[in-house]
Image: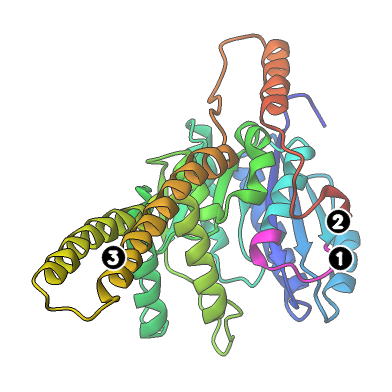
Amino acid sequence: MSPTTVKAFIVMPAFNEGDGIHGFLSRLKQHVHTLSAEHFANFHWTLLVVNDGSKDNTEECLKRASRELSDGRVTVSYASLLRNFGHQPALLAGLRTAAVRGADFVITLDADGEHPIGLIREIVEHWQGGAQIVHTSRLPDERLSMFKRRSSSLYYSLLRKFGHLDIGSGMADYKLWDGSLLRQVKSYLNTCGSTRAFASWLVPQAPVVFYRQEVVEGRVSRFTFVKMVSLAINGLVRYSDFPIRLAFYIGTCALGVGFLYFVFAIVAHLLGETIPGWTSIMAMVVFFGGVQCFLLGIYGEYFLRNLFRTTLPTFVVKRESSSSTDASAGTTRAQSYSERSSTTVKDSEYRA
């Protein structure tokens, strides 16, 4: 591989995809071969599938694909997780693996064939133009259920309103990450909550490529309602101040209402309109109830500043105007500043 070769990675989480994964990888290989021949002559492509604890023959199919489909321009490899961790952890494992292997950029997409591979050329051209992250966004499809479309729209609306994120409806995990950026933030990936929200927070106003989802007829989505709610909560709690500050607002209001009710109880006692003991009980309940809510809000502010904020990178370097050697050293230094010891999916938990 020459020094000018671009290391292009395509990362795909897969769970129980044994029936179609070999055929999909074959089509994807032919597509990137065509791209290399016509547009990206100095690219070497690595198709990295993260087998997320599949119960079927997915791993055997990946072994066969790795032997049969790899050639001089395309390498097919896989990483098998110890068990089924879920889509997001599998995606993070693939991103971390690609970053460690020195990827110049990483494209993430699903292995079920519903993300159109025809967008790859346009996505890469945005990267060649200087984009650090390139999003894709799914256009509304009438074949999807009304609930799926409405819930998706609601999720992104809440993220925009309360998380102040530049994220549009239909944003997918089908996106491109610049390799140098990914190496700077890879230690934060395990606490990012949602890669979609994290990417939008990291690079606001990144280019977006729109597409129509290639819905596979008869295929039942594994992204269940429970998983949708979990992803939504992760994104909102992670990137929005509103939920934690809500306790502070409620506590402040409760303290004010409690004070007014305290005054009312004293006045009622002085007017002789209460039974013995009622005034003291009500005064204690409303006062200490309001104080507790207020203090919970204060604690929430401390958590917000000292816990949540420290699990996002303080800064990320876009580019440096130094020699390649110095820039490489600078990237290493930036990594050392951002490294954290806690991980959800450790590097040792997957194997190539």
Q: Mark 2 Cα within 10 Å, few/some/many (few <14, many 20+)? A: few
Q: Determine whether label 1 and label 2 are within 8 Å by CB.
A: yes
Position in image of residue 177 (x %, y %): 58, 43
Bounds of the magenta segment: 81-89
Task: Name the image quarter holding residue 170.
Answer: bottom left
Question: Front-most of 4 and 19?
Answer: 19
The residue located at (55%, 21%) in the rendering is 319
Q: Identify the mark nearer the N-term, 2 or 3.
A: 3
User: Is disc 1 placed on a helix, strand or loop?
Assistant: loop
The CA span between labels 2 and 3 is 57 Å
**Residue 283 circle label:** 3
Magenta stretch, main secondary structure class: loop
Question: Front-most of 45 and 130?
Answer: 130
**Residue 349 circle label:** 2
In this rendering, does residue 39 appear at all? no
Please, is residue 177 above or below residue 256 in the view? above
Position in image of residue 302 (x %, y %): 49, 42
